[in-house]
Amino acid sequence: MSDGIISQYGFLFQRYAFIEDVINNAAMNLFFTYEGVDDIDVSDAKAVDMLAMASVSNNRYIQVKSGTVSKDCWSKVIGNWILTEDYQKAAFILLCENELDFKTNDADIIDFVYFYFEEGASKSKKSIARKVNDKIFVDNDENAIKEIIRELSQRCTVIIRSFDELKEELLKTFTDTYCTDIKIYEKAKERRFERFIEYIVAEIDAAIEKKKKYTITFQKLMDIVNRVRAEISDNKYTIETVELKKRKKKEAEMLMEDRDIREVRQLLLVQNDPAFVTGELVKELLYKDFRDVYADGGIEISNIEDMAYANYEDALLEFNETPSPKEVFVKTTRKPIETSILDNSPIYRNGCYVYLTGDDVDPDLQISWGEDYE
């Protein structure tokens, strides 16, 4: 596996760890910061910076490590915590995927960490070891420094959790807490959860692009929760599709290359243009996402697709002469599909019509823009 993929996986693991901590511990006066003083900071300081956080006594710092934690890595973790202004009273957590192959309180590990910092005197001024050396080696002897290391090691809580476990626990906590209004469609809970994650990750990425830390408060959390509640429920599916369309485009481009797919052949009859075909396939993929959520209920989906097919038949009756595939497509897709659960935007409307040109639909509902002779 390339270093780039490993690095991206680490960032993903850290994002989910951050979101889980927010969901589990959100309260009115708490500020959760991603990439602040540590990987994750939790404080009741209104100004979330090192000096403000040093003035309160209940700060919590979390280091998140995917992969294996080596002795060098553990030394850096301890070093990061020593560099906080309130290391003598704050709470520290190490969240990692795999069990440590050493005991952090053993004397040989305390010695290892000490010598790691002692050697920092000859390291770059930007290195953690050098910064720790500059901070505590001037005014403390070896025994005192080892005691600082030992005390931090004892105060640290090590949590072992795989990425899959992290995601499962986060999903359960979110759905148990913020999806109690969904009574019929279980997949609607999962889709609401996915949208919630997407919103948080997008805000984190936007902050990182500006080279800023990301902080979320209880109020901001509830704003996002209320947004996804309004978007996805037992009787509503209205979501922002801009980012979704971007992600679906690559999948649609791959599908377009497969001429065995009936939707592709039918769309090529309408307009032999890769951009057009890709765009309509994106709409179909978005409709399928919606359909996957509500298919178990049956009635609403059946009504939508029955109405779409009826619209198609009505469109055919409006022609006095044999229409071209493009004419059939245009006249059909302009007809609204009235439903309370889904907005009548061209994205889902066209997506439904394109879906009904596929091979896997009920033969009694299959529509055609023209004859493809396949």
Image (tube, rainbow, N blue to C red):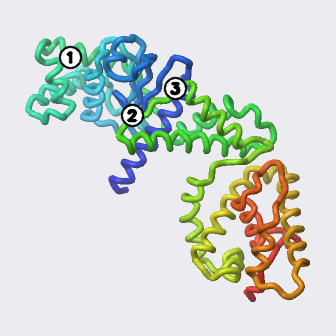
Q: Which corner quadrant of the image does residue 91 belong to?
A: top left
Q: Which corner quadrant of the image does residue 100 belong to?
A: top left
Residue to which mark 1 is pinned:
146
Q: Position of residue 59 (x, y in %)?
A: 41, 17
Give above or below for 215 relative to 232: above
Q: Position of residue 60 (x, y in %)?
A: 41, 20
At x 61% / y 44%, what residue is drawn? 195
Residue to which mark 2 is pinned:
213
Foreground residue among 245 and 355:
245
The quarter in which the C terminus is drawn is bottom right
At x 71% / y 43%, what residue is drawn? 232
Residue 99 can be seen, yes or no: no
Q: Position of residue 50 (x, y in %)?
A: 32, 21
How far apart are the two marked residues, 3 and 1, measured between alpha carbons? 37 Å
How far apart are the two marked residues, 2 and 1, measured between alpha carbons? 32 Å
136 displayed left or right of 206 = left
Q: Position of residue 228 (x, y in %)?
A: 66, 39
192 displayed left or right of 352 = left
Give above or below for 52 relative to 37: above
- The kind of residue tagged 3 is Thr
First-in-chain label (3 vs 1): 1
- Callout in the foreground (2, 1): 2
How far apart are the two marked residues, 2 and 3, measured between alpha carbons? 13 Å
At x 61% / y 77%, what residue is drawn? 258
Say few, some or many: other residues with alpha carbon within 10 Å of mark 2 (under 14 / 14 to 19 / 20 or more): some
Residue to which mark 3 is pinned:
217
- Callout in the foreground (3, 1): 3
The quarter in which the N terminus is drawn is bottom left
